[in-house]
Amino acid sequence: MEYKKLVGLYNSIEATSKRLEKTYLVAEFLKKTDIDDIPKIMLLLQGRVFPPFDERTLGVATRMVIKALNKSLGIDADAIEREWKRTGDLGITAENLAEKKKQMALFTTKVMVSKVFTNLRKLAEMEGSGTVDRKVSLISELLTSASPDEARYIIRTVLEDLRVGIGEGVLRDAIVWAFFEDSIHINYDTESKSIKPENRELYNAYVEAVQEAFDILNDFAEIAMLAKTSGLKGLKAVGVVVGKPLKVMLYKKVKDIEEAFESVGKPAAFEYKYDGFRIQVHKKDGKITVFTRRLEEVTAQFPEVVEYIKKNVKASSFILDAECVGYDVKSKKYLPFQSISQRIKRKHDIQEMSDKFPVEVNVFDILNYEGKSVIKSPFRERRALIEKIVSPLPYSIIPAKQIVTSDLDEAKRFYDAALKAGEEGVMAKNLDGIYKPGSRVGYGVKVKPVMESLDLVIVAAEWGEGKRSGWLTSFSLACYDPDTGSFMEIGKVGTGVKEKVELGVSFEQLTELLKPVIIKEKGRDVTVKPMVVVEVNFEEIQKSPTYSSGYALRFPRVIRIREDRSPDECSDLALVQDLYSTQRSR
Ligand code: ATP
């Protein structure tokens, strides 16, 4: 397929804010796409060439793009920089410059989707000396034959900043519309941009089937192929596979123990809510792999966890869901998450880190046992399995501390004990609940005394002035809108007079993290790739026309950087709305 066609789709998607219209556009496009191109299109629509759990990144810095533009268009770097300063966007810069060149040359070679895809994938594989030059060549090879608007999207994709406004919901529904239209007759009306499925229940069942398969596989490219080639049956057959990480189940927050019982029923299981870092542990053919909740592999960073699993879990194949909690080597007191967060990304001195900041593994769920998926088994059975296979060894590995009760006082005492032990609170779980990957269903709820905080992603920042001109000192925070895949601003935090109050982490630290992901600069304002997630406390949520979310935070304060959270896992708009409407009762 010619890349031009995909660019046409990008343009039409960007031109509408209507979710159903976006879905229709994508679905119609997929219907006409050759089977070989479907996976590439699904990924490129998300601005990526690898599925989300794949750790490879393209690693292209803005200066490489400038070199590539210089090489392919023959325009000198200073002129490119000037144009970039003027537009503030390298994609638009590429488009404008290619437009100029258009008058001089004819585009004889067509850019193909497969060529873009292959070259981008190659970018991720480059290592060692000469990498920059080879990367520049791969990009400029594409730009040489690209038309102006192709150049714009190539550059945005290369910089991993596509932003056309497609969220998971649109992709999910588009798969249904494209491949199951014959069975459900969606009846999209292009005038009113609305749908009238012949059978709403059936339609919802298809949407749910795609969603469930996605929650397990986490890859729309694979899901679209399955839907196309094996239909509903294929989607339903998607199972939990050991070795392949799947999304974790999330929990709702309730006010207190009474509400916990109301939510999950009686009797309920209560467990300590450990303040640590969530891992998914897979074991197959003697090999143990540890993933974060972002589905990144961290096996090498946690050698002692691998040892505990090897020695103290008696089964040959499984997937466990667990929380690693740090503790003080001498006093054996549990430590808050921050104490071990540095271990997640650490690539050197691993043993030293493990000796200094050891963790205890608290196993609270099991998703696969001896090759069989158990996510549809009731929680009481999954818990029994955990107790059967995990031999507890305190400060190494234990099943999460649990009681099962219908008694309010007993549950309250357990909650107090959890807080006394330095834990965050408790989880209450429905004994018959299944495990729903990726969802915040009510089979389990959390109770903790502190006010709900939000996990927000930094989308823009401002350079400081005077002594601080080399540092970013003000940060725009955004929540996630899963429908459009975009980030909606909800407030700003910064230094200045209230510095200590607003930033619980240093602006130097934030600058280091954000500098490499700056994608636009205009004066003191910079736009950054939405990558850094921070946890934010606040006094109140207010309605506000100032920010795109429609809400603003009163007295926001950053409490920590959440390395364990990916941007699309940050708090979504629905949660903000929820908190807004319930805050009075807090
Ligand atoms: P928080 O910020 O409150 O930790 P979260 O937003 O990261 O919550 P939630 O799903 O809302 O995630 O809360 C549950 C989290 O608590 C899990 O992701 C897990 O990391 C942690 N946790 C600690 N102990 C348990 C337990 N016994 N059962 C389930 N989750 C637990």
Image: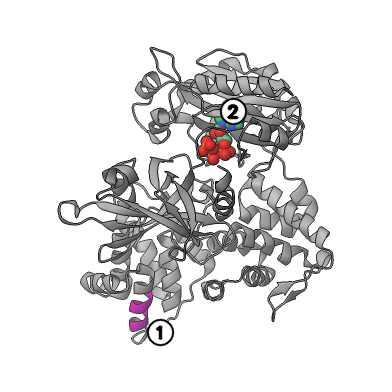
- Quadrant showing the C terminus: top right
Q: Main secondary structure of the magenta part?
A: helix
Q: Is residue 162 left or right of residue 101?
A: right
From this view, report whether residue 555 is shown above or below residue 442: below
Residue at the left extreme, as displayed: 467
Queried whether the magenta region covers residue 97, the answer comes back as yes
Mark 2 and mark 1: Cα distance apart in space: 66 Å
Residue type indicated by callout 1 = Leu
Question: What is the span of residues highlighted in magenta in the rendered image?
Answer: 95-100
- Quadrant showing the N terminus: bottom right
**The one of 76 and 417 positioned closer to us in this rendering:** 417
Residue 22 in the image: state x and y as whole percent: 61, 70
**Res. 320 in view:** no
**The one of 141 and 302 positioned closer to us in this rendering:** 302
Q: Which residue is mark 1?
A: 106
Q: Which residue is mark 2?
A: 426
Query: Label 2 CB, ligand 1: below 8 Å?
Result: yes
**Res. 335 in view:** yes
**The one of 383 and 269 positioned closer to us in this rendering:** 269
Q: Which image quarter has ligand 1?
A: top right
Q: Which residue lies at the image location 61% right of the left edge and 59% below the top edge?
A: 39
